[in-house]
Amino acid sequence: MAQVLCHLPKNPNDDNLLVGIGTSDDAAVYKVAEDNAIIQTVDFFTPVVDDPYVFGQIAATNSLSDVYAMGGEPKLAMNIICFPDCLSPDIMSEILRGGYDKVSEAGALIVGGHTIEDDVPKYGLTVTGFVHPDEVLTNANAKVGDVLILTKPLGVGIINTAIKAQMVSDETYKIAVKNMTTLNKFAKDIAIEVGVNSMTDVTGFGLLGHALEMAEGSSVSLKLDIKNIPIIEEAKELASMGLVPAGAYANMKYIGDKVNISEDIKEEISDILYDPQTSGGLLISVPKEKADIMMNKLKENPIECKIIGEVLDKQQYSIIVE
């Protein structure tokens, strides 16, 4: 995608476009009034679990996350569904019901959508949200001295790969589903309340890919502490068995020589850092003096949050993992 986008014009000359494609951010933001801006995003993908209702929940949670990552509130959503005619319409109904329930939980409305026939099922949402223009959070405003917080553990991409091979325990399956169906709303609300500098959600590019976008967009380097990065336990064993999705290797190629990972870190742990996350958590850059306040408030988050690193002056490497 980066190779394609580099040939297209950058953001149009419009002062009301607050966030466009220039920094590979999570969504577009357009100012419509002095006290209001629209957030626009779209996302959809193939099933990651067999249960159609749960798949609908996961896809909707993932789509809504981009609005939260910009500091906004989702308000309107439209279904995007691709569906083969060889499957029962009841399956489609369950997918849509799962999406509806998550959008309702977010306090937003599904107001329509579009369906096409396709050989492989796919589902997601276009989402419109709102945010005050002065409260937009981007992935390009991390400040030197900031503390980095991650609001969900890593490993769901590897676990999803293992689910397809029926190699995941029931307990880990439940943990992964809880991670993927937990809205980032609460963590976003705390980020706005405390006052953070930068934020992005960790999805298809993995932790290192999205951290790289934050580092490059902010002209800084990020140092990550491997001991503090939360990982779903069984993902480590699965990664050591080679159950690493192709997207992780694509992320490695994309990041290239911009990351320095300590030689002491095991290969399976390194692989997890590149693992594409489905409906992952938020990566938040918060001023150091506010970090303890934020972590105390995040104790009520449905998923454990952890401090995973810090923001440094620009170094030789954009990302340093030790």
Image (spheres, helix red, strand yellow):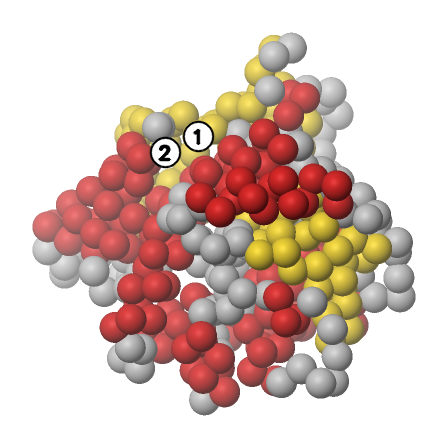
Residue 54 placement (x, y as % from top left): 25, 54
Picture quarter with the C terminus: bottom right
Task: Residue 224: give x, y in percent of width and height.
Answer: 71, 64
Q: Amino acid at mark 1?
A: Pro
> Where residue 123 appears, x then y in whole percent?
32, 49
Q: Is 181 rendered above or below residue 193?
A: below
Residue appearing at x 59%, y 65% in the figure = 229
Question: What residue sits 34% from the left and 56% below the top?
Answer: 178
Kindly report which numbered mark, 1 or 2, lies closer to the viewer in this rendering.
2
Q: Is residue 163 left or right of residue 284?
A: left
Can residue 106 be seen here? The reply is: yes
Q: Write down the quadrant of residue 128 in the picture.
A: top left
* Residue at numbered disc 1: 74
Along the line of sight, the residue nearer the viewer: 148 or 281 = 148
Considering the numbered disc 2 on the image, is that residue within a helix, a strand or a loop? loop
Residues at badges 1 and 2 in contact (C-beta under 8 Å)?
yes
Q: Quadrant of the N terminus?
A: bottom right
Q: Earlier in the sequence, mark 1 or mark 2?
A: 1
Mark linked to residue 8: none
* Location of residue 12 in the rendering, given as x and y in whole percent from the top left corner: 71, 29
Along the viewing direction, whichever of 61 and 1 lies nearer the viewer: 61
Q: Is residue 258 above or below residue 292?
A: below
Disc 1, SS: strand
Q: Mark 2 packing: few (<14 Cα in 10 Å), some, or many (20+)?
A: some
Q: Is residue 95 left or right of residue 160?
A: left
The span from disc 1 to disc 2 (Cα, nearest Å) is 7 Å
Query: What residue is drawn where x is 69% and y is 39%?
Result: 290
Q: Answer above or below: position of 145 versus 10.
A: below
The disc at residue 106 is 2
> Picture quarter containing residue 198?
top right
Inspect the image, locate mark 2, and give the three-letter code of the amino acid beneath it. Ala
